[in-house]
Amino acid sequence: MRSLAILVTVLASSTLFHWLALGQGGQTETPIGPKWWPSEWGAEDQRGAANRLTAQNVLAARDLIKTGKVYQLGRLYEQDMPIPGKRHFSLTIPGRPTGGPNGKNKIVHNDELVSGEIGQVGTQFDGLGHVGVRVGGEDIFYNGNKLSEFGDTYGLKKLGVENAGSFVTRGILLDVAAVKQERSLPIGYVITPEDLDKALKLAKTDIKPGDVVLINTGHGFWWKRDNKKFNEGEPGIGLAAGKWLTEKKVALIGSDNWAVEVVPSQDPDRPFEVHQWLLTRNGIYLLENLDLTELAADRAYEFAFVFAPLRLKGATGSPGNPLAIR
Amino acid sequence: MRSLAILVTVLASSTLFHWLALGQGGQTETPIGPKWWPSEWGAEDQRGAANRLTAQNVLAARDLIKTGKVYQLGRLYEQDMPIPGKRHFSLTIPGRPTGGPNGKNKIVHNDELVSGEIGQVGTQFDGLGHVGVRVGGEDIFYNGNKLSEFGDTYGLKKLGVENAGSFVTRGILLDVAAVKQERSLPIGYVITPEDLDKALKLAKTDIKPGDVVLINTGHGFWWKRDNKKFNEGEPGIGLAAGKWLTEKKVALIGSDNWAVEVVPSQDPDRPFEVHQWLLTRNGIYLLENLDLTELAADRAYEFAFVFAPLRLKGATGSPGNPLAIR
Amino acid sequence: MRSLAILVTVLASSTLFHWLALGQGGQTETPIGPKWWPSEWGAEDQRGAANRLTAQNVLAARDLIKTGKVYQLGRLYEQDMPIPGKRHFSLTIPGRPTGGPNGKNKIVHNDELVSGEIGQVGTQFDGLGHVGVRVGGEDIFYNGNKLSEFGDTYGLKKLGVENAGSFVTRGILLDVAAVKQERSLPIGYVITPEDLDKALKLAKTDIKPGDVVLINTGHGFWWKRDNKKFNEGEPGIGLAAGKWLTEKKVALIGSDNWAVEVVPSQDPDRPFEVHQWLLTRNGIYLLENLDLTELAADRAYEFAFVFAPLRLKGATGSPGNPLAIR
Amino acid sequence: MRSLAILVTVLASSTLFHWLALGQGGQTETPIGPKWWPSEWGAEDQRGAANRLTAQNVLAARDLIKTGKVYQLGRLYEQDMPIPGKRHFSLTIPGRPTGGPNGKNKIVHNDELVSGEIGQVGTQFDGLGHVGVRVGGEDIFYNGNKLSEFGDTYGLKKLGVENAGSFVTRGILLDVAAVKQERSLPIGYVITPEDLDKALKLAKTDIKPGDVVLINTGHGFWWKRDNKKFNEGEPGIGLAAGKWLTEKKVALIGSDNWAVEVVPSQDPDRPFEVHQWLLTRNGIYLLENLDLTELAADRAYEFAFVFAPLRLKGATGSPGNPLAIR
């Protein structure tokens, strides 16, 4: 009997117990707060905040197109761009030309061969399969999905980026660098709700459900100018600003840095916690390594935002070249 | 002296001579007709028909957005999609998860690793560095660019897809399958100018410079239903239709097949000649392996078309998920 | 109290309990039999049966070199070889040439770019990180190593193929196809200890600790002749033959099929069980997709065997071109 | 008439003329000296100096095996090894595990996925398709083969590494660092025939046709200790030493640096000229980035050398883990 008691005590204090409880739907704690699922879009939902995108959002975006100017927000993908950790990006042209000449018309053609973590290098869209939290022995993602169940070597069986659909909606530029009157905010600078409020005032607009918010920190200035500096940290939103944006019911948050959120994180023991708050808990998407230079220079604070992630089946993210149209 | 004469004779009859002449700007023949450069947009131009895209095109597209419905025209990228020749597509999730758990917030994350000719498999945008013609010892591309000069192992130095910019313009669906009252036109069916005219009448609109024309052949029906059949040929436009579209000054032509043009080609000795006509001679872009099913079902013949190729530096093409918006 | 009892009951009957017990070193069952570690080479060993390779084995191999004839046992790596499941193999030459011409010496050079599961396609060496068994929530490999501990996205932290070292030892060809007087044994044929005994008599030798045994099934005949047939199953050793070889204390077992063992397995509910017996429990390596044609034709039953896996840090296997020397 | 004369003059002074002459078999100059083909092994030969490897070489190698000690000369392949230029090396484990658990035996397995220029990163064997010279408009390789004829996007049609066969022969270590009493020779140090002579005396042996010569420069000391330094240049053989080795009729030359030859080259306008002398003109293979530390420490100057390149069809080189056996 005593050994039973010991076993039970051990279990009760373990993450295992938490997980058993979670598995049965009990209210309990996880390392990022209380159980947060099912999502507001139902227990089966795989789209998260993209559900906020309605025909009304499209029409509201349309109404912001007035001059016909188009801004490309995606950066060049190239081998010497800043790449974090052990990821890689290789682009080669097989053969020169790849094929031909064929026929009397002597046709020749070139392909390109790419190898790399293409949804997680360069300008990138983070899908809902990208970030989760370990609870007991399980890795829990958006809407309580367990990696042990939806993970698959050749593409996630749930939460793949192909579920996100497209983003055609209002885009708002919050130029925090301008508000702070700096070319680029220093690494580690925590963008606060107050900063966002001021930037929103500068933009002379408000944020509505389903909007896309792009935050200019100026950190993009270092892209390819100083890759080491670009990679070693960044200014970005803290958890409070993340919650502020969540309350505004945005669909997607983008920035000119590589993680949207501040690095190092406010609590050094809790790295990339804003990712978990946004992606894992709230199903809000992220867009990183944007080029916001021209948009900021034009003080283009409101625009139609259009982005369609590549439909890479089961991918965690997507490369991209999002557009702002005015 | 006699040997000199012989040498000269040999040279004069050779492709080499043609090339020497071409190199010096002389008017002469190539396997696809007379020298066609400099382009109408200047000798230095690398954008081709994308130059037709002006703010006016953007505004005209905007005016077609009336209901807010968005159509994704890109197909899923997956290993078992139809892939031509020796190209490949591999997507894996490194690790499960790729990283973590880290910190007290026990964050975990997944990446995807992709290897493949991503601009030339699945839904794909053909850039101006994709197709050319051998003239003498040189491979000539759009605007007379020689592969020996702009080719580079790690990305083309000219005509890379990053030069194309974005496509925000009117889109027109020419539903030739509907006109012919077939679910899918037979392999080898040559779409003619007359077919396009009828489809345009069905669409009750006209084609203006800078428009994007999407041609529904119904061949996309076989995608993943019968990959062998999908790959072995296709209905598509012939050279006459290609010229008809060129005269309309379109910016881009898309289709639900893998080459836009008919395969096998009308003249079996001149494979993919329409590619050369459009890309190489006229700088008109192609979009292949589109999913036009829903657009055709909705009889959505006019729409705002939005597509931004990935800015893969020096690439010959781009994967994509183009949008039609009404 | 009753709920405690229920919890305990549930746990006791679960694989979880097994695992807790295993974790504490208790003797218990796994899906492939009782706990089998620590290995005979110690609890820290990562080399398995390669430990049997001593200087004496090298000298014994040397003594079999009498004519100087060398046999390459590796097959060509090429895109149209038989490839199982969703693995891939791509080889391209970037550029033509890859680099140059440079300098007055006008040097040019070519590289090759390979993408693929290169330790697990074509001729392949299975290392000790390749195959394990799930026990409770843990994947257990050779010497009780848990994947949760030694797994790493960018290369295994233990049991990587670089630990195997090289194989310079006696090689024995057991030509079971010859014994059975068949060009190729039928798919599903279970090679028994009796078959191996007969083949050993034919070879007029015996097996000593640290030897490498190569088994000719004739299935290699179908390689590239009929890839579908090659992949859909194979003749190979059953569990009894696997145990017979284990008792002989061999270091490595090779064959001209893709899994060494019979497919489908004898017990259809226990696929690739011989892999687990050999790799996971006994640390005996495998070599698959060998070309044994010439060796068999020469009745070369004894030879010096030389193979050095690529030192791919943290890899599960290695491609190779093993040699037999007489 | 005058224009003809001008044309002829232009042609006669051009590389084009050289090439026309070469094409017709005339004796003429190339940027690396007079036409050097057909090779001594015939006009169709694709193996070069590997033809020197006979059964007698194998038996001579056997006779050097006396203690049974085996040295692995290959380095670990890992992402943070020194990698030149724009090549890359990526190794990941797809999934964790890659597959399973399956069956009642709950089998799991791991693969590795590699992307990279694997024959030209890390320890590498240079095949005869790796280096050539541009003559006129043609890239000429070993035995006069023209890249325009044998080049192919998916693997060379001639001179692929699979033609080399295996190397089982005497190996000689020439420890030039020891002769010069330095741990590592300085970058740019030109190893001369005199240096090799002295090292050969130290080795108390001679060089016979078909031998493999390994040159210890000590530059390998910097491998992963200082990758920048390792890559920025190296001590190595000059052209005179290359010719000395050619006269000795060796089959392969290896070293602990990344190019065997000195970098920068003696004549700064003629980079990697020794490569051309050895590979292109003489069909002698190279092995780079070897780990010769233990061999040098043991003063192991003579040994059986065994190496079998991977049979990567149409590849320019091969990764490897060559063995020295005593």
Image: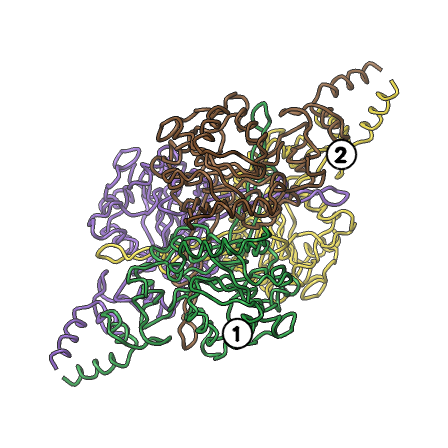
Chain colours: A brown, B green, C yellow, D purple
Q: Position of residue A280 (x, y in %)?
A: 61, 33
Q: Position of residue C5 (x, y in %)?
A: 86, 22
For residue B18, which quarter of the picture? bottom left
Q: Check the image and name the residue furthest to the bottom.
A: B2
Residue type at tag 2? Pro
Count of number-bearing discs: 2
Query: Quarter of the image containing the N terminus of chain B?
Result: bottom left
Looking at the image, residue D68 sits to the left or right of residue A280; the answer is: left
Q: In the rendered structure, the residue with mark 2 lies on which chain?
A: C
| Of residues B227 and B222, the one drawn nearer to the viewer in this rendering | B222
Q: Position of residue A172 (x, y in %)?
A: 48, 37
Query: Quarter of the image containing the C terminus of chain B?
Result: bottom right
Same chain assignment for discs 1 and 2: no
Q: Counting other residues with Cα less than 10 Å from the Cα at mark 1, is it few (<14), some (14-19), or many (20 or more)?
A: some
Question: Which residue is denoted by mark 2 in the rendering?
Answer: C34
Looking at the image, residue A285 sits to the left or right of residue A302; the answer is: right
Q: Which mark identifies residue B197?
A: 1
Q: Check the image and name the residue furthest to the left.
A: D2
Q: Give the alpha-carbon distance from disc 1 to disc 2, as whole Å.
A: 76 Å
Q: Is residue D316 visible?
A: no
| Of residues B126 and C221, the one drawn nearer to the viewer in this rendering | B126
